[in-house]
Structures are given as structure tokens and as C-alpha cells.
Amino acid sequence: MRRLWLTIALCGVSCAAALALLPRLGVSFFPRTDAGMFVINVKAPSGSRISVTESEVAKVEALIRQIVPERELGTILSNIGVTPGFSSIYTSNSAQHTAFVQVGLKEDHRVGLTSAQIANTTARYDYQTQRVVLDYQIGALR
């Protein structure tokens, strides 16, 4: 009990030092990363012909080419529909009215823009049509 006030003072200083370091700590368990790829899932109204889905996927591809600079765009891979059967359980495509567009950016793309580019693509597409549903996945931790 002889050094009670010294102990209390040291605890107070330690707490104040910990609070002073708080702004320097990160706020997420997994920091945001950018793998340079994203996937857009396209779903036309049920029962749509594959030609309708193909034209909608072409619109999405055109928007991607407008939004992502050519110097950063690597590849665009589109997969429309699926043959019904056992292999269809391994894909997000469930019928001829569904598709996905996978976009790979070049190795030297500007890091951090993938999220902004995909959000811009889906927002501009949603503005143009309300009958086709788009959702997306980013190949990184968010």
C-alpha cells in the first residue's frame, strides 16, 4: 500500500499511451486487397431465350470496355447458359437465362480501383435496364 498512487499513476499513463496509439491501428481483421479480377453474374427474366441473354451479356461487356481503361483490361470471359445435367451443379449458371462475365485486369493495373470499376459498371447497367439482375464478386478479400 505504500506505492498505491504510483501504481495508479502508471496504470493511467499506460491506458493513455494505449489510447494515443489507437488511431494508428487498422480497423479490419483482413485488410482490403485487390486481386485484379471480378465476376459479374447476369440473370435475365426466367424463360428468356439464350439469344436474349447473349445480347444482355454483350451490353455488359461493352460497359466494361467503356469503364475499365484499355491499358488495364486483360481478359473478358463470358459463359452463357449451361447444359442441364450433373455438371450444372458446379456453376452459377442454372439455365439459358443466366450467365457470368469474368474480367481479369492486367498485372500493372491501378490497385484499389476494382471495387470502384465494378460498382460503376453495375450502376450504369441498372440505369439502362431494370429487367436484368446483376450481382458481382471480387476476387479478393473485402
Image: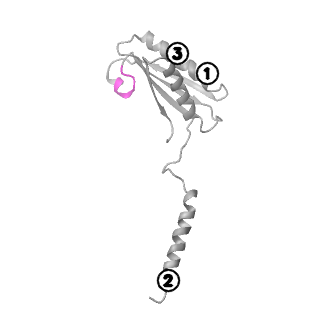
Query: Which disc is residue 5 wearing?
Result: 2
Q: Residue 74, percent across and down? A: 61, 27
Q: Amino acid at mark 2?
A: Trp
Which residue occupies 57% across, 23% down?
Answer: 64
Q: Amino acid at mark 1?
A: Gln
Which residue occupies 35% across, 13% down?
Answer: 47
Q: Quick check: 67 left or right of 8?
A: right
Establish if 32 lies above or below 76: below
Front tag of 3 and 2: 2
Q: Quick check: 20 left or right of 29?
A: right
- In the image, 76 versus 6, the foreground residue is 6
Q: Amino acid at mark 3?
A: Ala
**Quadrant of the snapshot with the N terminus:** bottom left
Residue to which mark 3 is pinned: 58
Q: Residue 65, percent across and down? A: 60, 21
Q: Residue 136, percent across and down? A: 47, 30
- In the image, 109 versus 11, the foreground residue is 11
Residue to which mark 1 is pinned: 66
Query: Which disc is residue 98 wearing?
Result: none
Q: Residue furthest left?
A: 86
Magenta-highlighted residues: 88-94
Q: Residue furthest right?
A: 71
Which of disc 1 and disc 3 is earlier in sequence? 3
Front tag of 1 and 2: 2
Which residue occupies 49% across, 17% down?
Answer: 57
Q: Secondary structure at mark 3?
A: helix
Query: Alpha carbon of mark 3 to alpha carbon of mark 2: how far?
Result: 74 Å
